[in-house]
Image (tube, rainbow, N blue to C red):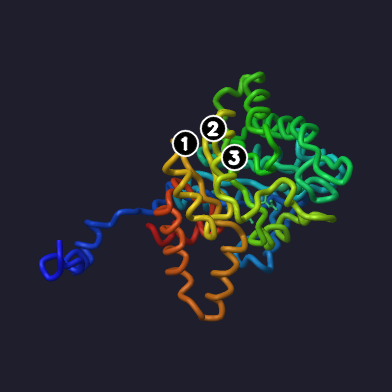
Amino acid sequence: MYFPEYRARRLRQSDQLRRMVRETHLRVDDLIYPMFSAFGEKIKKEIPSMPGIYQQSIEHIVAEAKDVHALGIPAVILFGIPETKDAFGQDAYSDEGIIQRTIRAIKDAVPELLVITDVCLCEYTDHGHCGVIKKGDVDNDETLKLLAAEALSHARAGADIVAPSDMMDGRVAAIREILDANDFHQIPVMSYAVKYASAYYGPFRDAAESTPQFGDRRSYQMDPANRLEALREAELDVQECADFLMVKPALAYLDILRELKDRFHLPLVAYNVSGEYSMIKAAAEKDWIDGDRVMMETLVGMKRAGADLIITYHAKEAAKLLR
Ligand code: PBG
Ligand code: ZN
């Protein structure tokens, strides 16, 4: 296959040919749209660092959920901003909590739209950490009990999939156990298996009002420099019977997506996080890049790296372009 006999450009000559040899396809079915449900009424507040993304009260969430469903997007993932926060994040596992009420409202209005819930405590604790604080650090095993209670409460409210994002050891097993003990054998666990301590979460923490009030998350989220540790984390979650594995963030970790895809046989999710979204939006606003094209190239890049599904704030815009 040497030049001039082989010419790679032969297969790039026309749109038809390029379509025929295209290897990776982004589909509406691959997209999951994140939403921020805020306590109260008549709230629709745009997040300054995330143009087009809102904190909204339940009636607005339901209206947007209908749009999401009409666009053909199969699922949303919910984050909550509760009325009150406390040291133990009680709203997170209360049957009248913000997320529980949001799940019921969405399932009532758009039953076919799958509702995934983020299972974590940082949006509900006054200190902003993802678990219970003991001796200045998050206590792993105490936190597991609360996460399990939170996942169960989401399932009771009608959640279709629960997605723990806390990075405590043993949480997938703890959640699987409590769900099975309560007849929720059919509720899948989408594990944020590989979650790095990332500066790319900055805009999300404004959106969810979940910035830690002291310290940082490095004693539970992963060091961005580590690859073998990612494989260990994924392996543990497979043993604990996770149904999906996730890598988060996505853009700076495409190599990790590829490694997980090659080694494990569960559906793989990429979380295209808030800071990745904000960078594209900001550069597009300045007319420095073509926002739509950069968005589609970024999303297809995540799929090419091995993602089966992508959680993305771009989901609605991408779905419109894919129609
Ligand atoms: C909660 C959680 C976070 C994100 C998803 N779930 C924030 C964090 O861990 O600080 C980040 C999502 C994003 O940046 O879009 N643990
Ligand atoms: Zn958290």
Please name the amino acid that badge 2 sits on: Val
Circle number at residue 238? 2
Distance from Cα at disc 3 to Cα at disc 1: 14 Å
Circle number at residue 233? 3
- Counting residues from the start of the chain, the first of labels 3 and 1 encountered is 3
Distance from Cα at disc 3 to Cα at disc 2: 9 Å
Quarter of the image containing the N terminus? Answer: bottom left
Circle number at residue 266? 1
Contact (Cβ within 8 Å) of mark 3 with mark 2: no
- The residue lying at 77 percent from left, 51 percent from top is 40
Image coordinates for residue 17, horizontal then vertical, percent: 19, 62
Q: Secondary structure at mark 1?
A: loop
Q: Secondary structure at mark 2?
A: helix
Contact (Cβ within 8 Å) of mark 2 with mark 1: yes
Please name the amino acid that badge 1 sits on: Leu
Disc 2 residue crowd, few under 14, some 14–19, many 20+, Cα 10 Å = many
- The residue lying at 64 percent from left, 46 percent from top is 78
- Counting residues from the start of the chain, the first of labels 3 and 2 encountered is 3
Distance from Cα at disc 2 to Cα at disc 1: 8 Å
Quarter of the image containing the C terminus? Answer: bottom left
